[in-house]
Amino acid sequence: MADIVVGAGVIGLHIALYLQKSGRDVIVLDRNEADHNCSYGNAGYISPSHFIPLATPGMVWQGLKWMLDNQSPFYIKPRLNANLIKWGWLFWKNANHRTVQKNAPHLFRLLKLSRSLSIDLHEELGQSFTLKQDGCLMLYTNKKTGHEEEVLARQAKNDYGLDVPVLDNRELKLLDPLISNKVLGGAYYKIDCHLHPREMMNVLKARLVEKGVKIVLNENIKSLDVHGRVLQNVITDCATYPVDNFIIAAGSWSPLLCTQLGIDLPLQAGKGYSHTYQQPHHNIQYPAILVDHRVAMTPMGNDLRVGGTMEISGLDLNVSRQRIPPIIQAANLYYNDLNLPVPPVDQVWAGLRPVSPDGLPYIGKDQNYKNVFVATGHAMIGISSAAATGLLLSQMITGQTTEIQMDVFRVNRF
Ligand SMILES: Cc1cc2nc3c(=O)[nH]c(=O)nc-3n(C[C@H](O)[C@H](O)[C@H](O)COP(=O)(O)OP(=O)(O)OC[C@H]3O[C@@H](n4cnc5c(N)ncnc54)[C@H](O)[C@@H]3O)c2cc1C
Protein backbone atom coordinates (compact mmCIF):
# COMPACT_ATOMS: atom_id res chain seq x y z
CA MET A 1 0.00 0.00 0.00
CA ALA A 2 1.14 3.53 -0.75
CA ASP A 3 -0.09 7.08 -0.83
CA ILE A 4 -1.08 7.72 -4.44
CA VAL A 5 -0.62 11.29 -5.68
CA VAL A 6 -2.36 11.93 -9.01
CA GLY A 7 -0.56 14.62 -11.01
CA ALA A 8 3.18 15.23 -11.43
CA GLY A 9 2.86 19.01 -11.59
CA VAL A 10 4.53 21.29 -9.07
CA ILE A 11 1.81 20.61 -6.49
CA GLY A 12 1.88 16.81 -6.80
CA LEU A 13 5.68 16.68 -6.64
CA HIS A 14 5.86 18.82 -3.50
CA ILE A 15 3.21 16.70 -1.81
CA ALA A 16 5.21 13.60 -2.68
CA LEU A 17 8.36 15.22 -1.31
CA TYR A 18 6.92 16.03 2.11
CA LEU A 19 5.08 12.71 2.40
CA GLN A 20 8.33 10.92 1.64
CA LYS A 21 10.14 13.06 4.23
CA SER A 22 7.64 11.92 6.84
CA GLY A 23 8.38 8.29 6.06
CA ARG A 24 5.46 7.40 3.78
CA ASP A 25 5.57 5.17 0.71
CA VAL A 26 4.54 7.35 -2.23
CA ILE A 27 3.58 6.79 -5.84
CA VAL A 28 3.06 9.76 -8.18
CA LEU A 29 0.83 8.89 -11.11
CA ASP A 30 0.51 10.95 -14.30
CA ARG A 31 -1.29 10.14 -17.49
CA ASN A 32 1.43 11.62 -19.71
CA GLU A 33 5.14 12.53 -19.58
CA ALA A 34 4.25 15.41 -17.25
CA ASP A 35 6.93 17.63 -18.74
CA HIS A 36 4.72 20.22 -20.42
CA ASN A 37 2.02 20.91 -17.81
CA CYS A 38 1.32 24.31 -16.27
CA SER A 39 4.30 24.01 -13.94
CA TYR A 40 6.92 24.51 -16.67
CA GLY A 41 6.34 27.61 -18.81
CA ASN A 42 5.14 29.91 -16.02
CA ALA A 43 6.85 33.08 -14.81
CA GLY A 44 8.57 31.35 -11.88
CA TYR A 45 7.64 33.91 -9.22
CA ILE A 46 7.58 33.02 -5.57
CA SER A 47 5.42 35.91 -4.61
CA PRO A 48 4.14 36.71 -1.11
CA SER A 49 3.16 39.98 -2.84
CA HIS A 50 0.14 38.11 -4.28
CA PHE A 51 -1.83 38.13 -1.03
CA ILE A 52 -4.95 39.61 -2.66
CA PRO A 53 -7.17 36.79 -4.02
CA LEU A 54 -8.02 36.89 -7.73
CA ALA A 55 -11.76 37.41 -7.13
CA THR A 56 -11.94 41.14 -6.37
CA PRO A 57 -14.74 43.64 -7.09
CA GLY A 58 -12.47 45.41 -9.62
CA MET A 59 -11.81 42.12 -11.43
CA VAL A 60 -15.53 41.46 -12.01
CA TRP A 61 -16.15 44.86 -13.61
CA GLN A 62 -12.89 44.83 -15.52
CA GLY A 63 -13.69 41.27 -16.69
CA LEU A 64 -17.12 42.29 -17.96
CA LYS A 65 -15.62 45.23 -19.84
CA TRP A 66 -12.81 43.07 -21.26
CA MET A 67 -15.25 40.40 -22.47
CA LEU A 68 -16.03 42.63 -25.41
CA ASP A 69 -12.37 42.90 -26.36
CA ASN A 70 -10.78 39.91 -28.12
CA GLN A 71 -7.26 41.11 -27.25
CA SER A 72 -7.89 41.61 -23.52
CA PRO A 73 -5.79 39.95 -20.82
CA PHE A 74 -8.85 38.45 -19.05
CA TYR A 75 -11.58 36.64 -20.89
CA ILE A 76 -14.40 34.25 -20.05
CA LYS A 77 -15.75 32.30 -23.00
CA PRO A 78 -19.51 31.98 -22.45
CA ARG A 79 -20.50 28.29 -22.41
CA LEU A 80 -23.44 26.27 -21.16
CA ASN A 81 -21.43 24.25 -18.66
CA ALA A 82 -22.70 23.50 -15.13
CA ASN A 83 -19.26 23.84 -13.47
CA LEU A 84 -18.65 27.19 -15.25
CA ILE A 85 -22.05 28.58 -14.26
CA LYS A 86 -21.58 27.61 -10.61
CA TRP A 87 -17.96 28.83 -10.67
CA GLY A 88 -19.02 32.20 -12.19
CA TRP A 89 -21.72 32.69 -9.60
CA LEU A 90 -19.33 31.85 -6.73
CA PHE A 91 -16.64 34.13 -8.22
CA TRP A 92 -19.09 37.03 -8.30
CA LYS A 93 -20.35 36.23 -4.79
CA ASN A 94 -16.83 36.18 -3.35
CA ALA A 95 -15.64 39.28 -5.20
CA ASN A 96 -16.45 41.73 -2.42
CA HIS A 97 -14.25 43.80 -0.16
CA ARG A 98 -15.19 41.94 3.03
CA THR A 99 -14.33 38.44 1.67
CA VAL A 100 -11.16 39.67 0.02
CA GLN A 101 -9.92 41.25 3.26
CA LYS A 102 -10.96 38.16 5.26
CA ASN A 103 -9.05 35.81 2.95
CA ALA A 104 -5.93 37.93 2.36
CA PRO A 105 -4.17 37.14 5.70
CA HIS A 106 -4.68 33.39 5.14
CA LEU A 107 -3.24 33.64 1.67
CA PHE A 108 -0.31 35.67 2.96
CA ARG A 109 0.50 33.10 5.66
CA LEU A 110 0.46 30.33 3.05
CA LEU A 111 2.71 32.32 0.69
CA LYS A 112 5.15 33.39 3.37
CA LEU A 113 5.51 29.84 4.69
CA SER A 114 6.04 28.57 1.15
CA ARG A 115 8.69 31.16 0.36
CA SER A 116 10.70 30.12 3.36
CA LEU A 117 10.28 26.38 2.59
CA SER A 118 11.31 26.93 -1.05
CA ILE A 119 14.47 28.72 0.02
CA ASP A 120 15.29 25.88 2.46
CA LEU A 121 14.65 23.35 -0.28
CA HIS A 122 16.91 25.23 -2.67
CA GLU A 123 19.69 24.92 -0.07
CA GLU A 124 18.88 21.27 0.67
CA LEU A 125 19.13 20.47 -3.02
CA GLY A 126 22.57 22.08 -3.22
CA GLN A 127 21.30 25.20 -5.06
CA SER A 128 21.05 22.98 -8.12
CA PHE A 129 18.36 25.09 -9.74
CA THR A 130 18.20 28.84 -10.22
CA LEU A 131 16.42 30.71 -7.43
CA LYS A 132 17.03 34.41 -6.90
CA GLN A 133 15.87 36.66 -4.08
CA ASP A 134 15.76 39.85 -6.16
CA GLY A 135 12.19 40.94 -5.42
CA CYS A 136 9.60 41.94 -8.01
CA LEU A 137 8.54 45.29 -9.47
CA MET A 138 4.86 46.09 -9.98
CA LEU A 139 5.13 48.68 -12.76
CA TYR A 140 2.29 50.97 -13.88
CA THR A 141 1.66 53.45 -16.65
CA ASN A 142 -1.63 54.77 -15.35
CA LYS A 143 -2.17 57.22 -12.47
CA LYS A 144 -5.19 55.38 -11.08
CA THR A 145 -3.26 52.09 -11.04
CA GLY A 146 -0.43 53.93 -9.29
CA HIS A 147 -2.81 55.00 -6.55
CA GLU A 148 -4.09 51.41 -6.15
CA GLU A 149 -0.51 50.10 -5.97
CA GLU A 150 0.32 52.65 -3.26
CA VAL A 151 -2.67 51.50 -1.21
CA LEU A 152 -1.60 47.85 -1.58
CA ALA A 153 2.00 48.65 -0.68
CA ARG A 154 0.76 50.42 2.46
CA GLN A 155 -1.39 47.41 3.35
CA ALA A 156 1.60 45.10 2.78
CA LYS A 157 3.61 47.24 5.18
CA ASN A 158 0.97 47.79 7.85
CA ASP A 159 -0.63 44.34 7.90
CA TYR A 160 2.32 42.10 7.05
CA GLY A 161 5.41 44.16 7.85
CA LEU A 162 6.74 44.03 4.27
CA ASP A 163 9.23 46.54 2.95
CA VAL A 164 7.58 47.82 -0.25
CA PRO A 165 8.97 51.16 -1.44
CA VAL A 166 6.94 52.84 -4.17
CA LEU A 167 9.44 54.27 -6.63
CA ASP A 168 9.07 56.99 -9.24
CA ASN A 169 10.41 56.71 -12.78
CA ARG A 170 13.82 58.15 -11.89
CA GLU A 171 14.29 55.77 -8.97
CA LEU A 172 13.16 52.80 -11.09
CA LYS A 173 15.73 53.67 -13.76
CA LEU A 174 18.47 53.44 -11.15
CA LEU A 175 17.41 49.82 -10.64
CA ASP A 176 16.89 49.07 -14.31
CA PRO A 177 18.01 51.64 -16.91
CA LEU A 178 15.85 49.99 -19.61
CA ILE A 179 12.61 51.07 -17.95
CA SER A 180 10.90 53.54 -20.28
CA ASN A 181 9.53 57.03 -19.59
CA LYS A 182 6.01 55.66 -20.08
CA VAL A 183 6.29 53.94 -16.70
CA LEU A 184 5.03 56.34 -14.05
CA GLY A 185 6.21 54.31 -11.10
CA GLY A 186 6.33 50.93 -9.44
CA ALA A 187 6.02 49.15 -6.11
CA TYR A 188 9.09 47.09 -5.28
CA TYR A 189 8.22 43.92 -3.33
CA LYS A 190 11.62 43.00 -1.99
CA ILE A 191 10.32 39.80 -0.41
CA ASP A 192 9.50 38.13 -3.75
CA CYS A 193 11.83 35.61 -5.37
CA HIS A 194 11.93 33.86 -8.71
CA LEU A 195 13.13 30.49 -9.92
CA HIS A 196 13.59 28.64 -13.18
CA PRO A 197 10.52 26.36 -13.27
CA ARG A 198 11.90 23.64 -15.56
CA GLU A 199 15.21 23.41 -13.67
CA MET A 200 13.33 23.20 -10.37
CA MET A 201 10.90 20.56 -11.60
CA ASN A 202 13.71 18.39 -13.02
CA VAL A 203 15.79 18.60 -9.85
CA LEU A 204 12.76 17.81 -7.71
CA LYS A 205 11.81 14.78 -9.81
CA ALA A 206 15.38 13.44 -9.60
CA ARG A 207 15.41 13.91 -5.81
CA LEU A 208 12.09 12.08 -5.43
CA VAL A 209 13.31 9.13 -7.46
CA GLU A 210 16.57 9.06 -5.48
CA LYS A 211 14.55 8.91 -2.24
CA GLY A 212 12.43 5.99 -3.44
CA VAL A 213 9.29 7.75 -4.65
CA LYS A 214 7.87 5.93 -7.65
CA ILE A 215 6.91 8.27 -10.49
CA VAL A 216 4.62 6.38 -12.85
CA LEU A 217 4.06 8.15 -16.18
CA ASN A 218 1.79 7.53 -19.17
CA GLU A 219 -0.83 5.52 -17.29
CA ASN A 220 -4.52 6.33 -17.45
CA ILE A 221 -6.81 5.79 -14.50
CA LYS A 222 -9.58 3.47 -15.63
CA SER A 223 -11.52 3.21 -12.38
CA LEU A 224 -11.44 3.92 -8.69
CA ASP A 225 -12.43 1.08 -6.41
CA VAL A 226 -14.38 2.47 -3.44
CA HIS A 227 -15.74 0.50 -0.45
CA GLY A 228 -17.92 2.59 1.85
CA ARG A 229 -15.93 5.71 2.71
CA VAL A 230 -12.59 4.28 1.67
CA LEU A 231 -10.91 4.36 -1.72
CA GLN A 232 -9.13 0.99 -1.85
CA ASN A 233 -7.60 0.59 -5.30
CA VAL A 234 -6.67 2.69 -8.29
CA ILE A 235 -6.97 0.72 -11.49
CA THR A 236 -5.05 2.03 -14.49
CA ASP A 237 -4.67 0.63 -17.99
CA CYS A 238 -1.47 -1.07 -16.78
CA ALA A 239 -1.85 -2.03 -13.12
CA THR A 240 -3.87 -2.01 -9.90
CA TYR A 241 -2.49 0.10 -7.07
CA PRO A 242 -3.71 -0.56 -3.50
CA VAL A 243 -4.25 2.83 -1.83
CA ASP A 244 -3.38 4.11 1.61
CA ASN A 245 -4.30 7.73 0.85
CA PHE A 246 -5.43 9.10 -2.50
CA ILE A 247 -4.40 12.67 -3.30
CA ILE A 248 -5.91 14.52 -6.25
CA ALA A 249 -3.34 17.09 -7.45
CA ALA A 250 -4.29 16.98 -11.12
CA GLY A 251 -4.39 20.75 -11.68
CA SER A 252 -7.15 21.94 -14.01
CA TRP A 253 -8.27 18.35 -14.64
CA SER A 254 -8.98 17.69 -10.94
CA PRO A 255 -12.77 18.19 -11.24
CA LEU A 256 -12.92 15.26 -13.69
CA LEU A 257 -11.45 12.90 -11.09
CA CYS A 258 -13.53 14.48 -8.34
CA THR A 259 -16.71 13.85 -10.32
CA GLN A 260 -15.84 10.13 -10.49
CA LEU A 261 -15.90 10.16 -6.68
CA GLY A 262 -19.05 12.28 -6.39
CA ILE A 263 -17.07 15.31 -5.18
CA ASP A 264 -18.28 18.67 -6.46
CA LEU A 265 -15.22 20.90 -7.06
CA PRO A 266 -15.95 24.31 -8.61
CA LEU A 267 -12.79 24.96 -10.62
CA GLN A 268 -12.03 26.40 -14.04
CA ALA A 269 -8.93 26.30 -16.21
CA GLY A 270 -7.39 29.78 -16.68
CA LYS A 271 -5.25 29.65 -19.80
CA GLY A 272 -2.09 31.71 -19.95
CA TYR A 273 0.73 32.05 -22.48
CA SER A 274 4.44 32.66 -22.38
CA HIS A 275 7.36 32.93 -24.73
CA THR A 276 11.02 32.70 -23.77
CA TYR A 277 13.45 34.87 -25.72
CA GLN A 278 16.84 33.14 -25.83
CA GLN A 279 19.67 35.53 -25.00
CA PRO A 280 18.07 38.77 -26.16
CA HIS A 281 20.42 41.69 -26.94
CA HIS A 282 19.25 43.50 -23.81
CA ASN A 283 17.66 41.95 -20.75
CA ILE A 284 15.76 43.32 -17.79
CA GLN A 285 17.35 43.38 -14.32
CA TYR A 286 14.37 42.48 -12.12
CA PRO A 287 11.23 40.39 -12.54
CA ALA A 288 8.36 42.75 -13.24
CA ILE A 289 4.60 42.70 -13.51
CA LEU A 290 3.24 45.25 -15.98
CA VAL A 291 0.15 45.86 -13.90
CA ASP A 292 -2.04 47.77 -16.37
CA HIS A 293 -1.52 45.10 -19.00
CA ARG A 294 -1.41 42.03 -16.73
CA VAL A 295 1.91 40.89 -18.19
CA ALA A 296 4.73 39.14 -16.29
CA MET A 297 8.39 39.41 -17.28
CA THR A 298 11.15 37.30 -15.78
CA PRO A 299 14.87 37.31 -16.50
CA MET A 300 15.83 33.61 -16.50
CA GLY A 301 19.61 33.44 -16.67
CA ASN A 302 20.49 35.04 -20.01
CA ASP A 303 16.98 34.47 -21.31
CA LEU A 304 13.82 36.52 -20.88
CA ARG A 305 10.35 35.06 -20.35
CA VAL A 306 7.28 37.15 -21.08
CA GLY A 307 3.79 35.88 -20.30
CA GLY A 308 0.21 36.80 -19.63
CA THR A 309 -3.56 36.46 -20.19
CA MET A 310 -6.20 34.60 -18.23
CA GLU A 311 -8.67 32.93 -20.55
CA ILE A 312 -11.44 30.93 -18.94
CA SER A 313 -12.26 28.80 -21.97
CA GLY A 314 -12.29 25.19 -20.78
CA LEU A 315 -9.66 22.46 -20.99
CA ASP A 316 -8.29 23.78 -24.25
CA LEU A 317 -4.59 24.43 -24.81
CA ASN A 318 -4.92 26.06 -28.26
CA VAL A 319 -3.23 29.43 -28.58
CA SER A 320 -5.56 32.33 -29.41
CA ARG A 321 -3.40 34.07 -31.99
CA GLN A 322 -4.85 37.54 -31.36
CA ARG A 323 -3.92 37.58 -27.66
CA ILE A 324 -0.14 37.29 -28.18
CA PRO A 325 0.77 40.69 -29.79
CA PRO A 326 -0.70 42.75 -26.90
CA ILE A 327 1.53 40.87 -24.41
CA ILE A 328 4.68 41.62 -26.41
CA GLN A 329 3.61 45.20 -27.17
CA ALA A 330 3.23 45.82 -23.42
CA ALA A 331 6.78 44.54 -22.80
CA ASN A 332 8.12 46.92 -25.47
CA LEU A 333 6.08 49.79 -24.03
CA TYR A 334 7.44 49.46 -20.48
CA TYR A 335 11.07 48.83 -21.53
CA ASN A 336 13.31 50.63 -24.02
CA ASP A 337 15.60 48.80 -26.42
CA LEU A 338 14.16 45.32 -25.97
CA ASN A 339 12.43 45.45 -29.37
CA LEU A 340 10.92 42.03 -28.81
CA PRO A 341 9.33 40.52 -31.92
CA VAL A 342 5.95 38.78 -31.68
CA PRO A 343 6.80 35.05 -31.70
CA PRO A 344 5.18 32.65 -34.15
CA VAL A 345 2.20 30.86 -32.61
CA ASP A 346 3.97 27.49 -32.60
CA GLN A 347 6.63 28.96 -30.29
CA VAL A 348 4.14 30.14 -27.70
CA TRP A 349 3.74 28.00 -24.59
CA ALA A 350 0.25 27.63 -23.13
CA GLY A 351 -0.67 26.43 -19.66
CA LEU A 352 -3.91 25.92 -17.75
CA ARG A 353 -4.00 27.44 -14.27
CA PRO A 354 -6.45 25.68 -11.95
CA VAL A 355 -8.62 28.59 -10.75
CA SER A 356 -10.95 28.33 -7.74
CA PRO A 357 -13.80 30.85 -7.51
CA ASP A 358 -12.59 32.61 -4.35
CA GLY A 359 -8.88 32.81 -5.15
CA LEU A 360 -7.91 30.33 -2.43
CA PRO A 361 -6.56 26.87 -3.21
CA TYR A 362 -8.32 23.72 -2.08
CA ILE A 363 -6.06 21.85 0.35
CA GLY A 364 -7.43 19.10 2.55
CA LYS A 365 -9.50 15.96 2.97
CA ASP A 366 -12.85 15.45 1.35
CA GLN A 367 -15.52 15.16 4.04
CA ASN A 368 -17.17 12.07 2.52
CA TYR A 369 -14.07 9.90 2.44
CA LYS A 370 -11.59 8.67 5.03
CA ASN A 371 -8.60 8.71 2.67
CA VAL A 372 -9.27 11.10 -0.23
CA PHE A 373 -7.45 14.45 -0.28
CA VAL A 374 -7.50 17.31 -2.79
CA ALA A 375 -4.77 19.88 -3.49
CA THR A 376 -5.49 22.18 -6.40
CA GLY A 377 -6.93 25.57 -7.33
CA HIS A 378 -3.63 27.43 -6.93
CA ALA A 379 -4.30 29.59 -10.01
CA MET A 380 -1.52 32.22 -10.25
CA ILE A 381 0.34 31.05 -7.13
CA GLY A 382 1.08 27.38 -7.79
CA ILE A 383 4.86 27.87 -7.77
CA SER A 384 4.59 30.35 -4.91
CA SER A 385 2.64 28.03 -2.64
CA ALA A 386 3.61 24.49 -3.71
CA ALA A 387 6.08 23.84 -0.92
CA ALA A 388 3.63 24.95 1.80
CA THR A 389 0.85 22.93 0.16
CA GLY A 390 3.09 19.85 0.24
CA LEU A 391 4.08 20.33 3.87
CA LEU A 392 0.57 21.14 5.09
CA LEU A 393 -1.09 18.27 3.29
CA SER A 394 1.51 15.81 4.55
CA GLN A 395 0.93 17.14 8.08
CA MET A 396 -2.81 16.52 7.66
CA ILE A 397 -2.26 13.00 6.32
CA THR A 398 0.14 12.05 9.09
CA GLY A 399 -2.10 13.53 11.78
CA GLN A 400 0.25 16.34 12.81
CA THR A 401 -0.77 19.85 13.79
CA THR A 402 -0.59 21.97 10.65
CA GLU A 403 1.80 24.90 10.54
CA ILE A 404 -1.04 27.31 9.75
CA GLN A 405 -4.82 27.21 10.13
CA MET A 406 -6.33 25.25 7.25
CA ASP A 407 -10.08 25.60 7.60
CA VAL A 408 -10.29 28.41 5.03
CA PHE A 409 -8.74 26.12 2.37
CA ARG A 410 -11.13 23.20 2.99
CA VAL A 411 -12.26 21.21 -0.01
CA ASN A 412 -16.01 21.22 0.66
CA ARG A 413 -16.37 24.95 1.37
CA PHE A 414 -18.94 25.64 -1.38
C1 LIG B 1 1.47 32.21 -18.00
C2 LIG B 1 1.51 31.68 -16.58
C3 LIG B 1 2.36 32.25 -15.68
C4 LIG B 1 2.38 31.79 -14.36
N1 LIG B 1 3.27 32.34 -13.49
C5 LIG B 1 3.30 31.90 -12.21
C6 LIG B 1 4.24 32.45 -11.29
O1 LIG B 1 5.07 33.26 -11.66
N2 LIG B 1 4.22 32.02 -10.01
C7 LIG B 1 3.31 31.09 -9.58
O2 LIG B 1 3.29 30.79 -8.38
N3 LIG B 1 2.44 30.53 -10.43
C8 LIG B 1 2.42 30.91 -11.73
N4 LIG B 1 1.53 30.36 -12.61
C9 LIG B 1 0.62 29.33 -12.10
C10 LIG B 1 1.29 27.97 -11.91
O3 LIG B 1 2.00 27.65 -13.09
C11 LIG B 1 0.19 26.93 -11.62
O4 LIG B 1 -0.56 27.33 -10.50
C12 LIG B 1 0.80 25.56 -11.31
O5 LIG B 1 1.71 25.16 -12.30
C13 LIG B 1 -0.29 24.51 -11.15
O6 LIG B 1 0.35 23.30 -10.82
P1 LIG B 1 -0.44 21.96 -10.68
O7 LIG B 1 0.55 20.95 -10.20
O8 LIG B 1 -1.67 22.19 -9.86
O9 LIG B 1 -0.98 21.61 -12.15
P2 LIG B 1 -0.20 21.14 -13.47
O10 LIG B 1 1.18 21.68 -13.52
O11 LIG B 1 -1.10 21.42 -14.61
O12 LIG B 1 -0.07 19.57 -13.28
C14 LIG B 1 -1.19 18.73 -13.26
C15 LIG B 1 -0.74 17.34 -13.71
O13 LIG B 1 -1.84 16.45 -13.49
C16 LIG B 1 -1.86 15.51 -14.55
N5 LIG B 1 -3.18 14.90 -14.65
C17 LIG B 1 -4.36 15.52 -14.91
N6 LIG B 1 -5.37 14.64 -14.89
C18 LIG B 1 -4.83 13.43 -14.61
C19 LIG B 1 -5.36 12.12 -14.45
N7 LIG B 1 -6.66 11.86 -14.57
N8 LIG B 1 -4.52 11.10 -14.18
C20 LIG B 1 -3.19 11.32 -14.05
N9 LIG B 1 -2.62 12.56 -14.18
C21 LIG B 1 -3.43 13.59 -14.45
C22 LIG B 1 -1.50 16.34 -15.79
O14 LIG B 1 -1.02 15.52 -16.83
C23 LIG B 1 -0.42 17.27 -15.20
O15 LIG B 1 0.87 16.72 -15.39
C24 LIG B 1 1.51 30.76 -13.94
C25 LIG B 1 0.67 30.16 -14.88
C26 LIG B 1 0.66 30.60 -16.20
C27 LIG B 1 -0.25 29.94 -17.18
Image: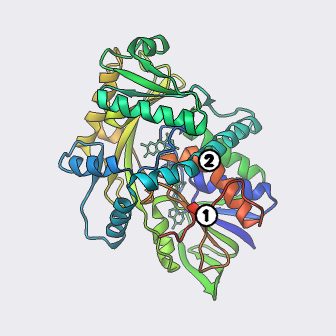
Kind of residue at badge 2: Arg
Above or below residue 56? Residue 179 is: above
Q: Dividing the picture into quarters, in which one does residue 266 lie? A: bottom left
In the image shown, does 94 or 195 lie closer to the viewer? 94
Residue beneath disc 1 = 407
In the image shown, does 201 or 390 lie closer to the viewer? 390
Q: Dividing the picture into quarters, in which one does residue 393 lie? A: bottom right
Kind of residue at badge 1: Asp
* Element on which disc 1 rests: helix
Q: Which mark is residue 109?
A: 2
- For ligand 1, tell me if the residue under mark 2 lies within 8 Å: no
Local crowd at mark 1 within 10 Å, few (<14), some, or many (≥20)?
A: few
Which sits earlier in the primary sequence, circle 1 or circle 2?
A: 2
The answer to whether one can see residue 384 in this image is yes
Q: Residue at x 34, y 22 (%)?
A: 334
- Where residue 245 appears, as percent x and y from the top left, is 69, 71
Above or below residue 191? Residue 179 is: above
Above or below residue 385? Residue 219 is: below
